[in-house]
Amino acid sequence: MGRWEPNAGGRLAKAALELYSERGFEQTTVAEIAKRAGLTERTFFRHYADKREVLFAGSRELQELFAQAVADAPESAPPIDALAVGLDAVSGFFADRREYARKRQDVIMANAELQERELIKLASMSAALADTLRQRGVAEPAASLTAEAGLAVFKVGFERWIMAAEKREMSQLMRESLDELKAVTAGG
C-alpha cells in the first residue's frame, strides 16, 4: 500500500463511524479503522491525530464558515440578524450530511469523553462568534450574549434536524428556532 490512495480521509471517516456505531467508540481501535478502510495505520495518522478527531475533523472549517458569514453580513444588520446569516451558511455546510450527522451524534452521546470534546468545540465556536461580533462593533456583554444565543439556536436546530422523523431542511429549522428565540426575548 505504498502508493497514493484516493479519498483516504473520507474512507477512514466512513470506516470509523461504521465501527463506532457497530462496536462503540471505546471498543474500536485505529488498526481496525484503517483495515476497514483498506489503508494502513500510518495513513490514518497522516489524516487524524487520534481516533476521536475523526468525529471532529470538520469543526474548524465549520467554525470558520460560521464566523466568516457573520463577518460578511451587511453592516446594517443587527447582531442577531448577522448570526442568522451565519446560521444559513452553516446549514449549507450540512447539506447532504444528515445521515452522517445522525450517526455521529449517536456515537458522541454514547461516550462522555466525546461529549466533553463536543462541548469544548462548541465553546470555541461561541468565542469565535463573539470575537467576530466585537469586530463588527458590538460591545460587551451584547457580543458574548448574542454569540451564545446563536450557538443555542444552532444546537436546538441541529438536534431537531437529526431527529429520525424530521424531513425539513436544516435552514428552515434554524430560522424557526431563531424566530422562537426572538419571540421569547420579545415577551411573545
Image (cartoon, rainbow, N blue to C red):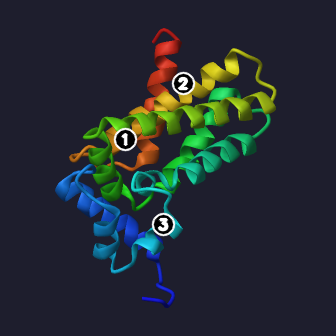
**Residue 54 locus on image (x, y percent):** 42, 57
Q: In this view, does 75 lie to the left or right of 102?
A: right
Query: Residue 29, image x and y in percent?
Result: 30, 60
Disc 2 from disc 1: Cα separation: 23 Å
The earlier-in-sequence mark between 2 and 3 is: 3
- Tell me which numbered mark, 1 or 3, is placed earlier along the sequence: 3
SS type, badge 3: helix
Looking at the image, which residue is at 40% across and 32% down? Answer: 156
Q: Nearer the viewer, mark 2 or mark 1?
A: 1
Query: Which amino acid type is shown beneath numbered disc 1?
Result: Leu
Residue 144: name its quadrant.
Answer: top right
Which residue, given by chain and number where applicable, does mark 2 sit on?
Answer: 149
Q: SS at mark 2?
A: helix
The numbered disc on residue 45 is 3
For image coordinates 50% across by 55% down, the residue present is: 57
**Residue annotated with mark 1:** 114
Neighbor class of circle 2 (other Cα within 10 Å; few <14, some 14-19, many 20+) is some
On screen, 69 above or below 134?
below
* Amino acid at dot 3: Phe
Q: Which of 142 and 173 is in front in this view?
A: 142
Callouts 1 and 3 close, C-beta under 8 Å: no
Could you say which is closer to the camera, residue 172 or residue 72?
72
Secondary element at image label 1: helix
Q: Which of marks 1 and 3 is in front?
A: 3
Q: Nearer the viewer, residue 117 or 10?
A: 117
Badge 3, how many Cα within 10 Å: few under 14, some, many 20+? some
Q: In this view, does 146 lie to the left or right of 170?
A: right
Q: How far from the left and from the top, in percent, is residue 172? A: 43, 43
Residue 178 drawn above or below residue 108: above
